Structures are given as structure tokens and as C-alpha cells.
Image: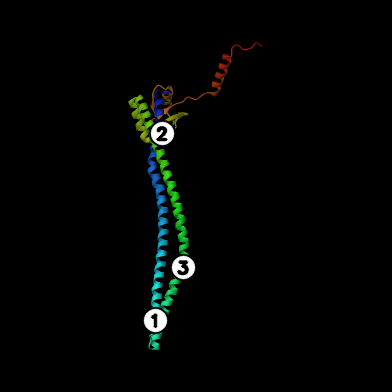
Amino acid sequence: MAPEIELVTRLQTLDTQITELQRAIAALPRHIAEIEKALDSHNRRLEADRAALAANQKERRSLEDDNKTQEQKISKLRDQMLGARTNEQYRAFQSEIDFCARAIRKAEDRILDLMGESEPLDANVKAAEAALKAEKASVEAEKAEARLKSEADKKRMAELQAERAAMAAKLNPKVLRLYDHQRRKWGSNTVVEVVEGRCTGCQINLRPQFLQDLRRGDQLMACETCGRILFYNPPVNLEHEMAAGTGGALNSGGSTPAA
């Protein structure tokens, strides 16, 4: 394996972690905006219920005031009826009294309707106020937790960026430029393994001579098709490794016992 491939691979790992942290940090304002938007929606719903309840109460008060006015008017008309000189005058006063009485009954019916409507409205407002108070506390706690996590992410990102700078300083500038150039295209899939003679980034088979040069591991090489930096891990022969391990165990145990 080329001497610098381990550094480049480590650099890719650091860059991937830094990118993930940057995304998490950038997502914080959006996350806070989303939970505040939901809270604002619930607050607007509560305000609508409050407005409906206030309108209900306002209409009831207005009808009750109108009824008082009509009752006062009926009282005056009855006093005036006592001084009526003709039947026509008497009937006119009575007709106006009847008209006021009908208005009062109509208003009373409407007041009863409003009272029936106000009960669920009042219950909704009280329930929504309690729920909103609890939700506000939950949202503030969630926002505080998110900010703490974001601060921890920023601290960790600074550590990773310092480690990256140290790692980049160890690389040949030419190799670093190659890596940075390819990373802008391929992101966290810039340094890839060669498996069965194929670049695992673009899935294109490598030329036999190119593959032979890569296997020697004396230089850092990039895929001729996609430009990704390549590394090659020779396959492990498990039977050979196990045999070597068994042999080693026998040799380390001294001479074999006599038959």
C-alpha cells in the first residue's frame, strides 16, 4: 500500500465527520424554527378560541343591554297607556308594547343559544391554555437541549478541524490538492478500495498493468475513469494463516512428545 494512502484515508474519515457535524449545526436554526412554528400554530388556534368566546360574551352583553332598554320602554309605554283618550291610542300603545316584548323574547332565545355555545368555547380555551403552557415549557427545554448539543458539536468540530490540519500538513501538497479536488466531486466516497480488479467507486474494471502497479503499493494512484484515489488490500488466505498459526503454536511448545 502506498505510504500516504493511510493519511489520505484518515483525512477522508475526518472530513466525513466534520461534514456531518456541520450539517447538524446548520440544522439547529431550522429545527428551532419548526418547533416554534408548531407552537405558534397552537397559539393562533388558542387566540381564535379566545376571540370566539369574547365575541360570544360581547353579543350576550349587547342583547342583555337591549333587553333592559326594551323593558324600560315597555314601562314607559304602560305609563303612557294610562293616559290614552281613545281606543286607537290604547291599541297603538299595546301594539308597541307587544313589539318590544317580541324583541325581548327573541333576544332571550338568542342569549340561551349563546350560553350553550359559550360552555364548550370556555372549556376549549381553558384546556388550550393549559396545554399551551405545558408545550411552551417542553419547547424551551427542547431548544435548550438542542443548543447544548450544538455547542458540543461545535467544540468537537473544532477538535476535528485541528486534527485535519495536522494531518493535511503531513501530506505531500500535490496529493492534498488531488484529494481536495476529488472530494469536491465525490464527497465521502473519494478514497475507495479496489476489489476484484474493479474500482468500487465507479464499478469500472482497471487495466491489468494499472492494477499491477497499484498492487506494488509504491505510489498513490487514482482511478483512470472517475479520478477517485484507490487503495488495494491483498486478500487474506485464511487456510495459510491458520496453518501458520498452528505451526507457530507447535514450534513454541518445544519438542513433540516421543511416540
The CA span between labels 3 and 1 is 33 Å
The residue furthest right is 259
Residue located at (45% from left, 53% from top): 130
SS at circle 1: helix
Q: Nearer the viewer, residue 5 or 210?
A: 5
Amino acid residing under circle 2: Gln
Position of 204 relative to 114 (above/below): above
Considering only order in the chain, which callout, 1 or 3, is on the residue closer to the N terminus? Answer: 1
Residue located at (41% from left, 47% from top): 35
According to the image, label 2 marks what residue?
17
According to the image, label 3 marks what residue?
113
Quadrant including the C terminus: top right
Position of 17 relative to 220 (above/below): below
Q: Nearer the viewer, residue 179 or 249?
A: 249
According to the image, label 1 marks what residue?
79
Q: Residues within 10 Å of mark 3 (few under 14, many from 20)?
A: few
SS at circle 3: helix
User: Closer to the camera: disc 3 or disc 2?
Assistant: 3
Amino acid residing under circle 3: Asp
Residue located at (45% from left, 29% from top): 194
